[in-house]
Image (cartoon, rainbow, N blue to C red):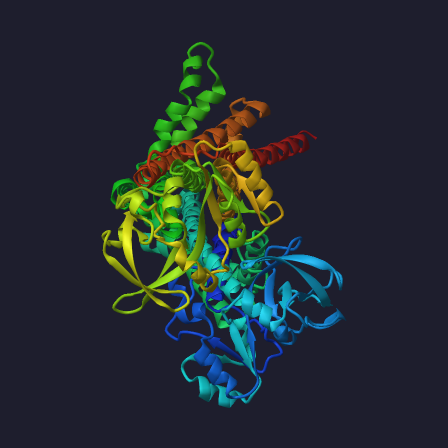
Amino acid sequence: MALQTLRGRWVPFLGTLLTLVLGTVQIAAMGVLLTTTLDPPQRPPERFAHAPAVVLPDDPSWNPAHHDIGDRSLQKARGVTPDLLRKVSATGATVADRAFYAQLADGPPDQVGHPWPVARFGGYTLTDGHGPTSDGEIVVASGRARTGAEVTVLTAAGIRSYTVSGTVAPVGWEDAVFFTDSEARRLAPRIEALVPLGATDRVRAAVGADARVLTGDDRHRADPSADRDREALDNTATLLPVMATVAGTTALFVVASTFAFAVIQRRREIALLRAVGATPRQVRRMIRAEALLVGGLGAATGAALGPAGARLLADLLIAADLCPPWFAIGSPLRPAVLAPLAAAFLVGVLVALGGATAAARRAGAIPPVAALGEAVVDDHATGRGRLLFGAVGLAGGVGLTAWIAFGDPSMVLSPTTHAAALLIPVLAAAVLAPQAVGPLTRLLLWPLTRRLRRSPSPVVLLVRESVPAARRRTAATTAPVLLTVGLTFSLLATGDTLGTARDNAVRDRVSADWVLAPDGTPGISPEVLDAVSGIPGVRVAALLPTTVYTRDEHRLEVHDAFVTDLSALWAATGPELVQGSPDSLDGGAVVADRWGVDAGTTLVFLTAEGRRARLRVAATYRALPGEDAVYLPRRFAATAGYARDGLAGRAYVSLEPGIDRAAAVAAVRATVAGRGARLLTEDRLVASEAAHARHLTEVRQRSVTVIVVLFCFIAILNTALMAAAERRRDLAMLRMAGATPWQVLRFFLAESLLVAGIGTVLALLATALNLTGVRGALHQLFGTTAVTMPWAAVASVTVVAVLLAAGGTVLPVLASSRAAAVRLAAARE
């Protein structure tokens, strides 16, 4: 019977099959990408591809997954120690590699400096000239400069002119500038790695547990791209759970709703079966068999298409710079691919069974006498299970909103957790949609209803009566519109509001006149900062990033730190001090209040170069969410070359009272011109940085939103087509009652617009609840914050959703009208 039913009513089952296939593809693709990030493809070595082995300082207990991007173990930050260099050199000839910032004046900001002896290990070959033989010579990639030319090179140690002694063939993974070994040692005291040319076994025995000896493909761990790979994969791994949570939950809900809707459409058949003696158990078995057949076919098809969907999704993420270009899914037979495909197939079948069984239980429980009446009009009350589930969801949404606003406002800073929280009110509104159909119909038609008293319109009257009479059908076609608009509005508005709150918080606490920012470089050289500080009447507070380590009972804790002129910084832009005063900052450290350390106590920590330091805590400050950096006095500037590249990310410039401000500003601009820095007002810097940060946030938000919206768009069209395909009887009755084709079309169009309007209103209500929690949380975190509304994006999505709902309803009506006209013409002939 299940097979015969599938054959006879393939139209509604085709719609459910399509939804299930797309939902399973979405779940499978997300799962494949997630497992692939945990087991990424092995990349070959680059910088040391031609080295027999590489000695890399490392900490076996260091797990990068437990730390933020850019954090390095103490051993790796310190680099090769003199003791380790002595041990390795004792085994035979050894080449030391140093990697540091070195940028030609007209070169890209990602250029890197190395000593010339390591060039051969990376496959560099001379195309012209010779290697550097004096400290004033360099070798660059072909096309950057010609041999014999004088070029300016920007480094953290200063800006200097060099002569190009030769050029090398460029490589795709690095843009290097090569110096003599002695000049590289002057520019960067820290040794990155060692290449031993002696026997590898002797090297392993010599270094013991002090370092790691890498050979084969493991040499890639010493490549600079290894850290970039980890950062890119971490970004992908951070984004994918958000996408999987939002998109997966949406797909499951839509698939289950579509299956339930397909069963609801067949109430007349189920009623007839009950009338001729079918038991409730037989009805449920038949529907479960249908769901198993459709679910098995759809889930199998979706799982088979999962790898292709994963590749397509990976390409989209690569194009958005959220995934590394080398990221590849690999063979479908890999365990990392097979496991999520099997899980997606199982989920698809279970969702199909669950969606169909939930509706079949109510249909199968109808007494035979009431079955035919039940099949005529869809006006009975919503099931208790649905009401309970919706009430729990609504209560959970309200409670979670209150908790976010007043209990744990930091939840809005976690994209994975908060994205899941945004789903709850939207899904609760979709579950309770049948209860809202009647009131919202009256509300939306109220303006037209008032006009009916003066000029009755049969179309409006029919719509007003038909929509509440088919609450289940209305709720089923409303749900995809609700999910589309609600999730789009909630996700985009939350992200935009959070970005605005952060920008305002930073802008409100800055009082500096001007700010120095990098200009085509990754940072500002200390030499440039010293030159600006030497201008009379100009005071500079630069932020030189570094790292400090504190030891707790179990491990070393890593903390971001900034080396700066503390009194100048707090005069220009310092956060609010909780303990201490701006007059007592010099010579001490300033830590965030959440550290729980009082001013006047002694802080014991390790610097990035491995030196133990004791420093008095001069003050504590009230940190913004996500901010807990340590501010150190300028005598720790040397540590920046070990922890980072030794460049300042920004510098605040204050002008002393009584000086010629125009002349001072002109002098600063002249000093930094052509030296990798530019002078900006604070507003321009904040706007620039906000635009960059917002771009990254928007790319992530829109990646999630696009996946959800595309699926929901298809679900809107699919559900509308399924609903319209079952309206032939309504169409025939309208024509028999004397309605013209134009009146019939207007009726179905008006009904579809009303249904889309109901979904949009429910989406706005759910979004309002979400944004209430967001605004309350951000008020506690950052102060008074206005909600930023992405009206253009939300309006565009809403318009497309409404057009799809209307098109999916009107197109079958037009087709049926044309078919009826053809049949009538044939009968007359």
Q: Position of residue 464 (x, y in %)?
A: 42, 24
Q: Which of 610 and 497 is in front in this view?
A: 610
Query: Quadrant of the image for the N terminus?
Result: bottom left
Q: In screen coordinates, is 300 left or right of 580?
A: right
826 is higher (above) or lower (below) than 197:
above
460 vs 383, left or right, is right
Residue closer to the observer: 606 or 477: 606
Note whether residue 199 is visible: yes
Q: Quadrant of residue 73?
A: bottom left
Residue 144 appearing in the image: no
Q: In which quarter of the image is residue 373?
A: top left
Percent position of residue 262, x then y: 44, 46
- Report the number of discs: 0
Residue drawn at x 45%, y 61% is: 638
Q: Which quadrant is home to the C terminus?
A: top right
Residue 61 percent coordinates (x, y): 37, 73
Reply above or below: 295 against 432.
below
- Judge whether 85 appears above or below 521 on screen: below
| Residue under the image location 41 percent in, 14 percent down | 450
Horizontal relation, residue 216 to residue 586: left or right: right
Residue closest to the far top: 454
